[in-house]
Image (cartoon, helix red, strand yellow):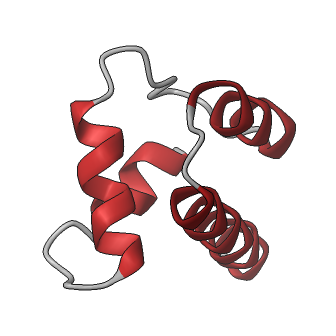
Amino acid sequence: MTFYDFVIGFEADDTPLGQLAHNIRRDKFFPKQATCYKELHSYFYSNYMDHEVLASANRALSLYRTNLNLA
């Protein structure tokens, strides 16, 4: 499962992760096939400046890594 697929699952949530999912869906250049933490982390910190979005991205990346380890 890609990070994009994972985070889009939160899109209907009225939470910071839901807002992150909305931001990512609107991002035409988001690496939709990415699964690598370093690649995704680098993308967020190069393209997003809002501290709340970055905090949500870090939380989502942590959840994603945990989810992959449990699979």
* Whole-percent x, y for residue 35 in the image: 66, 40
Residue depicted at 30% across the width and 17% down the height: 28
Residue 1 visible to the viewer: no
* Whole-percent x, y for residue 52 in the image: 54, 67
Residue depicted at 41% across the width and 60% down the height: 7
Q: Is residue 45 left or right of residue 11?
A: right
**Placement of 71 over or under 33, stated as above or below:** below
* Whole-percent x, y for residue 19 in the image: 29, 65
Farthest right residue in view: 38
**Placement of 54 over or under 62, stated as above or below:** above
* Whole-percent x, y for residue 71 in the image: 66, 75
Residue 52 visible to the viewer: yes
Q: Is residue 17 left or right of residue 43?
A: left
Residue depicted at 72% across the width and 82% down the height: 70
Farthest top residue in view: 29
Q: Is residue 4 left or right of residue 39?
A: left
Image quadrant assignment for residue 6: bottom left
**Placement of 5 over or under 60, stated as above or below:** above
Image quadrant assignment for residue 8: bottom left
Q: Is residue 37 left or right of residue 11?
A: right
**Placement of 23 over or under 19, stated as above or below:** above
Pick whichever, 71 or 65, lies toward us. Answer: 65
- Tally of numbered tags: 0
Residue depicted at 44% across the width and 28% down the height: 32
